Image (spheres, helix red, strand yellow):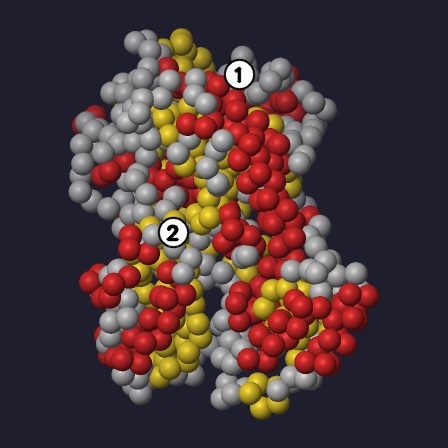
Amino acid sequence: MVDDSDSVRIGVDVGGTFTDVALLVGDALTTAKVPTTTPQHAGVLDGIREACDAAEIDPADVDAFAHATTASVNALLERDGARTALVTTAGFRDVLEIGRQTRPSLYDLRAEKTPPLVPRRRRFEVDERATTEGTERAVDPESVRDLAAEISASDAESVAVSLLHAYAHPENEAAVASVLRGELSVPVSASHDVLPEFREYERTATTVADAYLTPELDDYLGQVVAGARELGLPAPRVMRSNGGVADAATVRESAVTTVLSGPAAGVVGAAAVAGGETLGGADGATGAAPAAVTFDMGGTSSDVSLVRDGRVERTAETTVADVPLRTPTVDVETVGAGGGSIAWTDAGGALRVGPESAGAEPGPACYGKGGTEPTVTDADVLLGYIGPDAALGGDLSLDVDAAREALSRLAEAADIGGDGGSGGDGETADALDAPAAAARGVYRVANATMARAIRSVTVERGRDPRDFDLVAFGGAGPMHAAALADRLEMDRVLVPGPAGVLSAYGLLAADETHDAARTVRLPLADATAVDLGDAFAALTDRVLDDVSDPAAARVDRAADCRYAGQSFELTVDGGSEGEAGTAGDAGSAVDPDALAERFAAAHERAYGYRLDAGVEAVTLRVTATVEVAAPTVARTGAADAERGSREVVFPDEGTVAATVYDRDALGAGATLDGPAVLAGTESTTVVPPAWGGRVRRDGTVVLERDAAGGERR
C-alpha cells in the first residue's frame, strides 16, 4: 500500500542479459531482475509489473519513471542501425572515411579499418561554400531537390547533413536540411543542431551517428511511452550519456546523446551512494562533498569513473565501436576484465586475462552450460569466494568440478604447480593444488588489469587514489574491490545495498540535465566581458527551451580554452559559483582575464607549466540542471545474518576460515570483521582479513582497512 505522503519513483535499466528495476516507495526500496526480451520494451514493462507486485502497489501510483536504454549502443556495436545517407560539401564526401592521422596500429601494414556507418555509395555532395567569415556561395534549392530524388532511390532510412563550417555559419546547411525534410519522409539530422563545433571529422561522425540511431531509438521509445501509458505510468524520462535525464520527446530528437545511457546511470547511482553520509543516508552528516572512484565489474568488462566534489566527472568526447562521438558524456574508462573474461597464456607462457569473454552462452565453466574455458568467475569459485551452493539465477547452479577442470588445464599450460602459499605473518598456510594456484594467479592478473584502469583516471590525471573512496558494484565488483583498494592503498570501500542493480537505482537519483555548446574561437585578450556574457546567454536560452521548469534550473557555464597555436583544449569553469548562477543571471558578464587565468592554472596542473602566450576560448558550453531529491533508503534486516563459515583463499594470506553472512539479511548498524564473505542474491562481497565493515542505514556496506593497533579508521 502507498501512503499519500510517500513519493513513488521507479527506474528501469536494460542490460544485455537482464533488465533491472529499482522501485522506491517512500524510503522502502524494492528491486527486481527480469530477462531482457526481444523486443526490449516488453521486458521493461514486465520488470515494472514484477517490482510493483512485490511492493504491493499499482503502477498507476508511480509518480516518476526514469529509464536507461541500450538501444543506441547496441545499434552501434552490432552495426544494425538505419541505412543512412550523408550530404556534405562538394569535395568532402570522404571526410568520414579518411578520419584522422591517429591510428590504433600505426605500423601494422595489414590493419583493417572499421567501415564507416555510411558507405560511399550513399554519400552525396552539394555545391556550396561557407567559411568561418560567412557564406561565399549559397546553395541552390533546386539542386537539393534533385539530390533528394537520388537519396530516395538509395533506399536510405535517414539522412545526415554536415557542410563545411556549418558550426559558424549554418545558413546553407539549414536550407539543405529544410528542403530534404520537405522532399523525404525520413529523419534528417543537421550538424549545426547536433554538434555546432569545429573539427569536420568529429562533427560529421557525430551527426552521422545521430542519423544512424534515430529511427531505432524513436521506434523503441515510442513503444515504451505507449506501454507506460497503458500501465498508468507517467511518461518516462530517459537517461542520456551526460548523466542526466530528459523527457522522451527531447531525447527522440537527439539519439546520439543516449549511447552510454546505462553506464552513465551506474555512475550516477555510485555518486549517490558516495554522498550517502553527506546526504543523510548514513550515520551522520560529514559535510564534505564525496570523492570516489566508481568501479562496475560486470560479465565482460569493468568500468571506472570519478566523482569529485560530489559531481560526476564528464568529458566532451568519447569513442564507441570505433565511432568518435562529440557529446557530453560521463567520463568512463573501460577494460576487458569481467567475471566472464577468459584466462589464457600468451606465446611466452605468461598468464593473461581477457579481453575475450565466455559471454552468457556458454558462460564460465562453472555454469555447467558447456563452457570449457577458464574465467575469472571460475577462479572466484575455486578460491571460495562464491560458495558451492550459490544460486546463479533461475535453475542454474554451480559446477565446481567443471571450474576445477578448466583451471587445471590452464595451470598445465602456464606451468603453474601447487605451492604452500605463505600467510600474511610469514607462517605457511595450507598448500594450494595446481588448479587453486592457477585461480589465485587469474585473480591477481584480473585485479592488476582493473587497478591499471583506476590509475588511468587518477594517477595519470594527477590525482591520488588514496584521496578517494572506492564504490564497487555490478555482479563481480564487490568480490574484487577490497583487493583493488589494497593495491592502490585506498582505505575505504563502499558496497551499495542494490549493488547488482545500481544503474536502475541511479535513475532514481538522476537530475534533469540539458547541454548546449558552440565554437566561437575568441582570443580572450580581444574579448570583452559583455562579448562572453552575450555568447553564453545565447546558449543559455537554448538549453532553457528544453528544461521542464526553467525557474528551477541551475545554469553552469564552461569554456574549452587553449594557448594560441595549440591543437588541444582544456575545459575550465566559465565563472565562479555566483557567476555561473541560475537562469536569472545567466547573461551576466564573464571576465575574460579571469577565464584566462583559470585556464593557465588548469594547464599548469595538467602539464606542469604555463606559457606567456595568448589564451583563446574555442568552444563555450552551458549546462542547465534541475535537481531531484536524493533517494533516501531505510534498510531492515534479520537479527542474525551469520550463515556459518568456509575456507577461502586470499592471495597474500593463504587459506583461512571466513565467516559467511547473508548479505540481504544484514541490517543497518551491523558490524563485521574479516575474513568474511557476504553472499547476496545479486552479488557477493569479499572482506579480507585486514578489513572490517559496518552497514549504513541505506544498506551500504562500508569496508575499512584496519589501522595500526587494531582500531578501524
Q: Which residue is mark 2?
A: 548
Q: Closer to the camera, 121 or 301? A: 121
Q: Indicate the position of residue 175 as horizontal and vertical percent values.
A: 61, 77
Residue 152 in sight: yes
Tell us which disc is closer to us: 1 or 2.
2
Q: Quadrant of the N terminus?
A: top left
- Mark 1 vs mark 2, CA separation in Å: 46 Å
Q: Which residue is mark 1?
A: 390
Q: Is residue 219 left or right of residue 709?
A: right
Residue 614 found in image quarter: bottom left
The residue shown at (49%, 60%) is 327
Q: Closer to the camera, 586 or 360? A: 586
* First in residue order: circle 1 vs circle 2: 1
The answer to the question of whether label 1 and label 2 lie on touching residues, with beta carbons closer than 8 A, is no
Looking at the rendered structure, the kind of residue marked 1 is: Ala
Q: Closer to the camera, 338 or 617? A: 617
The 10 Å Cα crowd at callout 2, few under 14, some 14 to 19, many 20 or more, is few
Residue 706 found in image quarter: top left
Looking at the rendered structure, the kind of residue marked 2 is: Ser
Residue 431 against residue 712 in the figure, above or below? above
